Image (cartoon, helix red, strand yellow):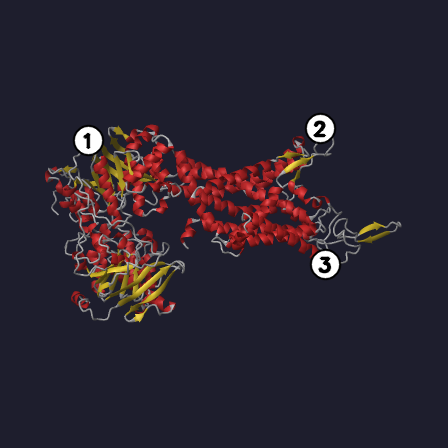
Amino acid sequence: MSFQPVILWTDALVYLLLLLIAVTIWHTRRHEHLLQPWRRVSASRTGQAALVVLLFYVIIGLLDTLHFNPRVDPGAPGDAVYSTEVLSVFDVIAGPLRTERETTYSAPFATHLFSKKTVYRPDGSAVREYPRLRYGGSHLDEHGNGKLADIVAKGALGALQGALVWLVLLLVLCLMQPARLLRLLSGRTPTPWHVGAWTALVVVAVFAALWELSEHYHILGTGKVGEDVFFQALKSIRTGLIIGTLTTLVMLPAALLLGIMAGYFRGWVDDVIQYLYTTLNSIPGVLLIAAAILMMQIYMSNHAEQFSSLTERADLRLLFLCLILGVTSWTSLCRLLRGEALKLRELDYVVAARAFGVADFRILLRHVLPNVMHIVLITIVLDFSGLVLAEAVLSYINIGVDPATNSWGNMINGARLELAREPVVWWSLIAAFGFMFTLVLAANLFSDVVRDAFDPRLRQQR
Amino acid sequence: MSLIEKAMSHDTGSAEPLLSVQGLSTHLGSASRPVRAVDEVSFEIHRGETFVLLGESGCGKSMIALSIMRLLPPSGRLVAGNVLLEGQSLCALSEAEMRAERGGRVGMIFQEPMTSLNPVMSVGQQVAEAVRLHDPDHHGRVNDRVVELFRSVGIPDPERRAGEYPHQLSGGMKQRVMIAMALAGRPEVLIADEPTTALDVTIQAQVLDVLRNLQRETGMAILLITHDLGVVAEMADRVGVMYAGQLVEVNKVKDFFSHPMHPYSRKLFQSMPTAEKRDRGLDVIPGIVPALDQPFECCRFAERCELAQDACREAQPPWHGELRQGYRCVLGPEQDRDIDAAGLVALDATRAAGAELLLVNDLKVHFPIHKGVLRRVVGHVRAVDGVDLRIPAGLTVALVGESGCGKTTVGKAILQLIRPTAGQVLFDGNDLRRTRGAALRRLRREFQIIFQDPASAMNPRMLVEDIVAEGLVAQGLGGSRSDRRAIVEQLLEQVGIRSNAADRYPHEFSGGQRQRIAIARALALKPRLIICDEPTSALDVSVQAQVLNLLKELQSDLGLAYLFITHNIAVVAYLADEVAVMYLGRIVEYGVVDEVLGSPLHPYTVALLSAVPVADPAHQREVIKLQGDMPSPIDPPSGCYFHPRCPRAMSVCRSHYPPMVELESGQRVACWLEVPEERHPSDVQATSD
């Protein structure tokens, strides 16, 4: 085998999350009342468009989650020796993007470095000039003439390729029936699938154009040590998604169990749980996170031998950040669920179940839990964007993810000092901002749609 | 306007009507598939007249009121017709002009006084606001006018009450405040949308009385909306019957009760439970109200009408008679419309009392009140304060009382859903209060409960099959999944639900069907006792009849015993064998149903029965008005709990709670009036007052 699969801690949790989602989908499909709100979601144009954008992010994030160790010398006889470097499938696809590094900053689409350097000519004379980039625009001539035309041409080519891919994909989805495809695209289906389809066209075409261009240029410039910012921003997607989803996954069992137990049992159980979350809530969140991360850091530097690679170490720190964010954020959901359970326990069907002699734990499972799931779902989706933003803020003040991990927060943090430069190095900041903004906007729009579809009180108003 | 003038005004049909609704149509929801909530409704009301709109839930009667006031919900719109007030079209007014009419010439009161008042303003301020807006004569003297209004709606001590906040007032008082507010603009028309539905009968009697007196004094017209035939008989001059968005009959109240014209009106009367119908099943209207989101080409009652002919299904039936008295049916006025009642099941009325099934001795449920940081107990809510009950196998015992008297708590305490504070609950010899854990869980299969609201009694996320089988699973009965399925299907069949219902969700059923499913669920464990907690209060009359029939049939088939908790005296008269009347956590009178309802002894029972509106305008009765409201169970009055409101209270009542006296007839009463004077406690002087 030319590679050895690696499953990092966060990877394992992502797989667990996928499994949970798959089970949920399977379960939902069998229950009409669970399916109904999702039908309302799919009937919303905003929801469809947002979902397509989110899916795009998720696909990149998932490709970046399949990790492996490459073989050091593929094809060599004898026992395979694997590198300690951990790569992901996305790294392989990105290929040159990852490896083609310049020496330092360069502006988007530049052919020359951003700062002057002393260059020694072959004749021995030293000149201070903007050196030519090694990779960016290397197919052009010395001065980068005809760059604009080249960009337009390559961009158009990429967009065209993207559109083709989109068409083929849709055809496959429509079971190879062009008539069905036409009906779908013209919006003659009961559900507005055409909105999703056209959004997908825009996303795929834009991404394909950028991808095509990125093979020849650093379309978002390069960073301090010459790494491609476009690649960095794409790699950060996984970090953002992991923080946004795993944190919820981590906190969910505690919030669910404690919340409905407090509401259902009342009495001393309620008191204990209430005191627990009130106490936790009174500790300043940032301080708690800072303390926990610092402790983690010290532990990791004292026990460096336990980590086989830098990636593994950075991954553990990411997981730890999720955990500690989860610990500080489960209280609000817990409080919401307690209130709902207080209401539910007085409802006649819960009383009826007690009159049948149904055991308490079974009542919680069959009567209370299914009836609070809409709150859980709404909270998860609403919290997601907040957590993505929280990561950026925490990384900015250096208590976020490992500096070696690609993340939007780290990109912003890195760009911070360069903002004081003249001329300003703005592209890292803008890239991180743009990617984060698109994700958070899509997530927020989607969460609004989900909330409208699931909240029974809102449903009655229409 | 005097009574004579009032009487004159609606005999002279030629006079200009005060409020005239002409061909009103109101649609709700999307334009492509609108819900036709109101469909070409026309009627008129004269000065000093009370016009009652009668109909079951969802028939569009409230939508008419909202259309007149132009207060339709955002999705609703007037699509046709006109509303004329003294010849002036309300539909043509601008929104600003309409605002002056609302609360001005047209006042409105709503069903729920609890939510119609702002909780952070004193009630006086809220009425003053209405006075300032609509009564220019009283600028500068607003507070005087508020007190005057409060006095006119019968609020005692109006100066003090004006400064109080809604939560300090009882439901009846709040509804009076709402009426005072509606009166602030001296309305010519008062629209009352189910004004007493949320209130107890004794309070309802007070509020209806207030409305009647106000009408006599001011001569305003009242448009009263209700579903209660008793209220119609009490209040109406003329009545309009609504069915599925349409007015199907308009009639003078006397003629309506003696000769209802429309088959639907007839059916309504026949499905009402009364004591005379005890020995047979009630007449029911089969089927359900058609969905209103379709255009109707035919009579919309045809599907459920036993007199339906081919003509009914072909075209809209014509309107016979005139606007002020007429009906919509293919049958002409002279045609025979007697419905054969022979199809009804005769039920065996002579049920012998079996062995004693449930014995409740001195049951008490006190809820502690905690206060302060340390949550110290500072007092108790005495929800149930010493109740004795005896339920023989196979009989129905009704527990009657007004809201807040603790009757529901008794039911739950018997089932040990709320643990009693003291007393004994002996079920077949087992003291349930001393049974716990697994032993109690096993015993639970013997007694079950049916709730008031079938919608909230079933988990909306479970299939009917799982709902009905829940008890079987919990008790480990019913064997395998397929065995259970067979049991569920058989149970559903038994309550008259098609067995394919098992794979559907509760929200797919109507209220009556849901209540049947709830009954099937209770039957699953073959219980011997079912506690029915107001099982028909949330249902319409025609649906109530179906459920009552079912309960009665099941009792004669299976020998069930019922503890029937209700405030509906008519249902008690129809269904119960014995009655216990409850007041403030204690039973004040107990006996066989005919005796308690026929010759009540306790002053509270007498007042309660007199306050129940009777669906017969010829029936003259004197309502015994009770003063004030039921006291709080936190701090019950000394002596007899009823003495502050009792018209016959004696001095002994103020200091000593009366003992339960058993009379020769078997009737038991807790009242000093029934205790021979020589047995009165010696420290009280002889009753000279």
Q: Which of B139 and A123 is in front in this view?
A: A123
Q: Where is residue A94 in the image (x, y as percent from the top left)?
A: 68, 45
The 10 Å Cα crowd at callout 1, few under 14, some 14 to 19, many 20 or more, is few
Q: Which of A448 and A393 is in front in this view?
A: A448
* As drawn, B18 above or below B155: below
Q: Position of residue B217 (x, y in %)?
A: 21, 64
Badge 3: chain ID = A
Q: How many labels does the image show?
A: 3
Q: Residue A79 carries which label?
A: 2
Of circles 1 and 3, the one toward us is 3
Residue under the image location 75 percent in, 47 percent down: A102
Q: Nearer the viewer, residue B246 or B475?
A: B246
- Return the residue at label 3: A149
* As drawn, B97 above or below A362: below
Q: Residue B355 carries which label?
A: 1
Q: Is mark 2 on a helix, strand or loop?
A: loop
Quadrant containing the C terminus of chain A in the rendered view? bottom left
Badge 2: chain ID = A
Q: What element carries label 3?
A: helix
Q: Position of residue A130 (x, y in %)?
A: 79, 53
Q: What element carries label 1?
A: loop
